[in-house]
Amino acid sequence: MNKCIILVFVTGFGTIATPLSAQQYQYAGLFGENAYDIQVVKQQENSKPVLILEEKERYSKHTFHPKLGTEKWVLRDKKEKHNFTAQRTDNQIKIWGTFQGESVEKTVDIDERLWFNKLDHGLSEFAASDQQELSFWVLKLVSDLDPLKMEAKKVGTESLTIDGKTYESVKVKLTIDNFVLSKLWSAELWYRASDGLFLRYEGANGGPGTPTTIIELDKKIEG
């Protein structure tokens, strides 16, 4: 169960071609002793916010909707042999393509809660709002893309220093939306208080004994 949560965070690889209006950021990831870079682009497509991430052998694109959270998610992962699209209509998510090297075509039922499969950046709007708690859906990458309810809760504000620069931040705790399962896994995230920009993630990447994963804002790339 633990491993499935962090897997919805990690995405993409390569160099991203972006329009002039896009915002570009670089994040530094650390899993145990393994360091890696994540390229992030935020832009608008057809008046909808879009998030594109590339890192190592993985690419993901997330299209957001104000009433649905994630509206469409595209994931291509050479190592894990994923190449699929998931798209939400009302309270259903249709999935098609290739998952773990096998053809997949399925529809999963959820409820009116928002859906996010990029939890760190996807929760930026929540972090910048007055809302204190949020229950939402994810699709688990280690169990045939089954839906799972998660909960984000604001736990306070902090001054967070990254690479010598200090940010006033909102701290969010992320857990599984289940009393028992919430004791087994959690993660902490920090967002810039002024606008909800994702700054830092810290949490386990798997079961007991798995190294902690840390993701931090590295720099904004000027276009």
Image (cartoon, helix red, strand yellow):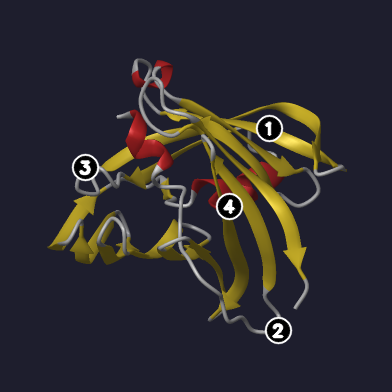
In the picture of the structure, the residue carrying the numbered disc 4 is 121
> Is label 3 in a helix, a strand or a loop?
loop
Is residue 38 at least partly visible in the picture? yes
At label 4, counting other C-alpha atoms closer than 10 Å, the crowd grade (few under 14, some 14-19, many 20 or more) is many
* Residue 49 position within the rendered picture, expressed as x and y whole percent measured from the top left: 57, 68
Q: Which of marks 2 and 3 is nearer the N terminus?
A: 2
Nearer the camera: disc 3 or disc 1: 3
Nearer to the camera, 35 or 69: 35
Question: For the residues marked 2 and 3, what is the alpha-carbon distance in whole angstroms?
Answer: 39 Å
* Residue 214 position within the rendered picture, expressed as x and y whole percent measured from the top left: 59, 38
In the picture of the structure, the residue carrying the numbered disc 3 is 143
In the picture of the structure, the residue carrying the numbered disc 1 is 171
Question: For the residues marked 3 and 4, what is the alpha-carbon distance in whole angstroms?
Answer: 23 Å
Q: What residue type is labelled 3?
A: Ser
Q: Earlier in the sequence, mark 1 or mark 4?
A: 4
Circles 1 and 4, Cβ within 8 Å, touching? The answer is: no
Question: For the residues marked 2 and 1, what is the alpha-carbon distance in whole angstroms?
Answer: 31 Å
> Height in image: 91 above or below 1?
below
> Is label 1 in a helix, a strand or a loop?
strand
Please report the residue visible at 70 percent of the width from the left and 70 percent of the height from the top.
23
Q: Earlier in the sequence, mark 3 or mark 1?
A: 3
Q: Which amino acid does label 4 sit on?
A: His
Q: What residue type is labelled 2?
A: Leu
Q: Residue farthest to the front?
A: 33
> Is label 4 in a helix, a strand or a loop?
helix
Please report the residue visible at 28 percent of the width from the left and 55 percent of the height from the top.
80
Query: Quadrant of the image for the N terminus?
Result: top left
